[in-house]
């Protein structure tokens, strides 16, 4: 005979066994299990990604410091010469160029460089080598001696070039002496991995808000699938003396298998990443397995934390939800439609699109968009309820004419009781819109990007600007070897103590005549000068010259006298045709120290815009995971809402003898609401920013993200509707008179 103390001692084990058994019993077991597993997997994935991002960011900063040269003021003790030559681009992607030159036979090469290249040769990162293979001029920097190893890159996909100048391009006076690499005190000298990295708080906000939070929402939706059954069970157990902690242990044990499966899936993804390198070409990223193994203890702790957070989230949702009236076909009170709120929401949405077009103020347009979008989201439940009620009315009308029982029942249910379905659909629509806003703000561009696109379409490569100007013999040799259709022009600021700085444009007399300019020194307004030749207009726009412009003839193309003015070099086409940019870049690397980093008008903004778009792609990638998790959990919750009505549907199907109408019922009750929520939110995401798709600050929606949300909604709706129809069909086959509640224990 078991005594009371013994029973108390064995009670926790009994509750755990009971919870594990309950996780495999009941009508909604599979639906709840899948929702909890998906929610736990995504929650855990978000925390693991956050831990990994922190570790990778620290590794990136450490490698960035290890790549910085140790500069010295004494050339006698220097081992090498280095020069930070700035940035060029390959296919609109930025590339860092640095010049290196050994001064001693045992001079240390840069980290990741196996051996010193020969003069005129380069050492490039693997990403640059890949870009060059697709380039029309793969030797634009010079012959490739070797590739930079992982230890010499801030990120695995960084674009970096180490250039050893040719004898003609070598200018030791323009380079800085160094004793080696790994100085943490030198200012600057960072590469693109550090310079283009998103702030850590933005990464944390994206992973927590775009992945972990949707995972918790999915867990909340999954926890509520069998609320009625759990409430009944809690009441029975409380009557026989169960305490609150006993009920929590029982609920935790019931959720444990599903949460553990989700956590295991996330752990399996980490284990796979620790085994092989993961290449993500669309995101221009490679996750190195060695890096994952290095941070594996932290990632393992994040996995365990994700498991604990998932269990606590389930228990929290169960605890805060009190006993509620059961929802199903047994509901008898029709729900009033919030037509007024829905009308306000749609009206505000239309105003959000139209009103910004009447304003040229960037801040005002952005404020209108923020306020309008916020009001639209707040009225989204009313919009969904009215839309579903209207769709249900249409379905019922069609069913009355066609005699479709399933369409009639499903349509009437949506028409009379749309509020609960709308609340469940709100999770889908809300997450699609919320993560869409994150993508819009993360990838917003400015007017400069639009102007740069227009400049590329207008000027092409008829005008090239040197970002790294040289004035020595190499620059003069480069200008001498220019093709006949290319001529140099220079701009500089003329300082005056009693007048504002004046923009000066200088060129030889022959070049000025080719551009329809006088060979005499003259002063023109910016508008007048821009009318003379498109090339001159491009120079004016690039140099941001808006006042009067001095035109000054130069005696020759010699660059040396212009060093005193720190003049900017432009290479212009004299016949209006595009210049061979790649060929001129290659010539500059052969003759000038570090190359000239030539670029067409607006190229720097286009390059920066590509970086911003890449950050937006990361937002879409992570946000899509969160959207998919909520989409699946909400679809399962709506499916459970339909299956909960089995006690009303099963007798009808059993007595009618036909069960084919169960599929139309599931399509109207499940597929339609899910589709309306997902597709409608995707369309709203595309339409709402239309009023600010141009101007000082603008946002461009991603068709990829919208397509993912819409197609994902359609597929999820079809699968869940099919599962619900098959479940109802099975229940109707097994129904016998006297069966009352399929949701009982």
Image: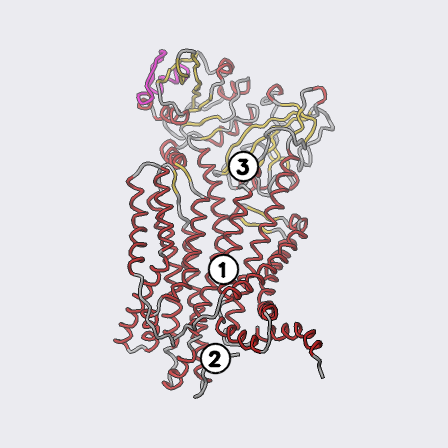
| Residue behind mark 1 | 217
Whether 271 is among the magenta residues is no
Residue 268 position within the rendered picture, expressed as x and y whole percent measured from the top left? 62, 59
- How many other residues sit within 10 Å of disc 3, few (<14), some (14-19) or many (≥20)? some
Task: Say which of 231 and 611 sits in front.
Answer: 231
Residue 9 position within the rendered picture, expressed as x and y whole percent measured from the top left? 70, 73
Alpha carbons under labels 3 and 2: distance apart: 70 Å
Q: Identify the element where label 3 is drawn.
A: loop
Alpha carbons under labels 1 and 2: distance apart: 27 Å
Q: Identify the element where label 2 is drawn.
A: loop
User: With 698 as the anchor, is 113 left or right in this view?
Assistant: right
Question: What is the residue that sits farthest to the right in this orientation?
Answer: 106
The residue mark sitting in front, 3 or 2, is: 2
| Residue behind mark 2 | 742
The residue mark sitting in front, 1 or 3, is: 1
Residue 712 position within the rendered picture, expressed as x and y whole percent measured from the top left? 44, 60
Quarter assignment of residue 509:
top left
Whether 522 is among the magenta residues is yes
Which quadrant would the N terminus be assigned to in this image? bottom right
Q: Identify the element where label 1 is drawn.
A: helix
Q: Confirm or deny contact between disc 3 and disc 2 (CB under 8 A).
A: no
User: With 339 as the anchor, is 54 left or right in this view?
Assistant: right
Closer to the chain start, of discs 1 and 3, is 3
Residue drawn 64% across and 32% down? 68
Q: Confirm or deny contact between disc 1 and disc 3 (CB under 8 A).
A: no
Task: Say which of 277 and 120 sits in front.
Answer: 277
Describe the colour scheme in one phrase.
secondary structure
Alpha carbons under labels 1 and 3: distance apart: 50 Å
Q: Is residue 710 visible?
A: yes
Closer to the chain start, of discs 1 and 2, is 1
Dot label at residue 138: 3
**Magenta-highlighted residues:** 504-528
């Amino acid at each position: 005979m078991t005594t009371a103390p013994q029973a108390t001692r064995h009670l926790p084990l009994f509750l755990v066994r009971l919870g594990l058994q309950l996780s495999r019993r009941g009508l909604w077991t599979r639906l709840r299990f899948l929702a909890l597993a998906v929610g736990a997997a995504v929650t855990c994935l978000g925390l693991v990604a956050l831990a990994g991002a922190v570790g990778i960011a620290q590794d990136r900063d450490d490698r960035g410091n290890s790549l910085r040269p140790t500069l010295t003021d004494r050339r006698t003790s220097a081992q090498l010469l280095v020069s930070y030559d700035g940035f060029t681009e390959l296919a609109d992607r930025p590339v860092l160029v640095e010049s290196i030159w050994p001064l001693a036979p045992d001079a240390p090469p840069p980290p990741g460089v196996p051996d010193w290249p020969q003069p005129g040769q380069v050492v490039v990162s693997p990403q640059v080598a890949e870009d060059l293979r697709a380039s029309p001029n793969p030797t634009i920097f010079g012959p490739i001696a070797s590739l930079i190893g992982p230890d010499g890159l801030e990120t695995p996909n960084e674009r970096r070039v180490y250039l050893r100048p040719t004898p003609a391009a070598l200018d030791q006076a323009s380079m800085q002496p160094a004793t080696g690499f790994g100085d943490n005190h030198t200012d600057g000298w960072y590469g693109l991995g550090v310079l283009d990295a998103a702030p850590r708080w933005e990464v944390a906000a994206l992973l927590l808000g775009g992945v972990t939070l949707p995972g918790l929402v999915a867990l909340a939706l999954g926890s509520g699938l069998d609320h009625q059954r759990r409430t009944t069970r809690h009441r029975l157990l409380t009557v026989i003396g169960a305490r609150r902690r006993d009920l929590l242990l029982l609920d935790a044990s019931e959720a444990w298998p599903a949460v553990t499966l989700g956590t295991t899936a996330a752990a399996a993804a980490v284990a796979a990443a620790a085994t092989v390198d993961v290449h993500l070409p669309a995101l221009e990223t490679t996750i190195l397995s060695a890096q994952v193994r290095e941070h594996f203890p932290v990632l393992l702790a994040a996995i365990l934390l994700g498991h604990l957070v998932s269990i606590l989230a389930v228990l929290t949702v169960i605890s805060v939800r009190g006993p509620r009236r059961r929802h199903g076909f047994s509901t008898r009170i029709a729900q009033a439609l919030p037509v007024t709120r829905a009308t306000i929401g749609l009206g505000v949405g239309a105003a959000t699109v139209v009103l910004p077009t009447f304003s040229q103020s960037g801040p005002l347009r952005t404020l209108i968009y923020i306020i309008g979008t916020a009001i639209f989201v707040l009225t989204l439940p009313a919009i969904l309820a009215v839309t579903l009620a209207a769709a249900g009315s249409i379905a019922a009308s069609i069913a009355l004419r066609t005699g479709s029982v399933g369409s009639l029942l499903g349509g009437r249910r949506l028409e009379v009781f749309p509020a609960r379905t709308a609340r469940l659909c709100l999770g889908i629509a809300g997450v699609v819109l919320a993560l869409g806003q994150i993508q819009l703000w993360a990838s917003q561009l400015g007017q400069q990007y639009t102007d740069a696109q227009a400049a590329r379409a207008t000027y092409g490569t008829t005008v090239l600007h040197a970002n790294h100007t040289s004035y020595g013999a190499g620059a003069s040799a480069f200008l001498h070897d220019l093709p006949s259709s290319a001529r140099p022009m220079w701009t500089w600021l003329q300082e005056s103590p009693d007048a504002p700085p004046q923009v000066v444009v200088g060129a030889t007399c022959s070049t000025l005549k080719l551009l329809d300019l006088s060979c005499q020194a003259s002063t023109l307004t910016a508008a007048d000068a821009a009318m003379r030749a498109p090339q001159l207009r491009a120079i004016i726009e690039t140099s941001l010259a808006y006042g009067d412009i001095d035109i000054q003839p130069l005696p020759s193309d010699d660059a040396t006298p212009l060093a005193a003015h720190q003049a900017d070099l432009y290479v212009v086409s004299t016949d209006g045709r595009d210049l061979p940019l790649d060929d001129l870049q290659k010539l500059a690397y052969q003759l000038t120290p570090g190359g000239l980093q030539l670029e067409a008008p607006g190229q720097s903004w286009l390059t920066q815009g590509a970086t911003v778009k890449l950050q937006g792609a990361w937002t879409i990638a992570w946000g899509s995971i969160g959207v998919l998790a909520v989409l699946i959990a909400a679809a399962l919750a709506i499916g459970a809402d339909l299956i909960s009505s089995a006690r009303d549907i099963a007798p009808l199907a059993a007595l009618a003898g036909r069960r084919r109408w169960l599929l139309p019922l599931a399509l109207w009750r499940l597929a339609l609401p899910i589709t309306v929520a997902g597709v409608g939110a995707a369309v709203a995401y595309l339409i709402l920013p239309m009023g600010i798709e141009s101007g000082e600050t603008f946002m461009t929606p991603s068709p990829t993200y919208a397509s993912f949300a819409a197609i994902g909604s359609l597929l999820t709706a079809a699968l869940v509707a099919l599962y619900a129809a098959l479940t109802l069909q099975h229940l109707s086959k097994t129904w016998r008179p006297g069966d009352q509640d399929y949701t009982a224990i």
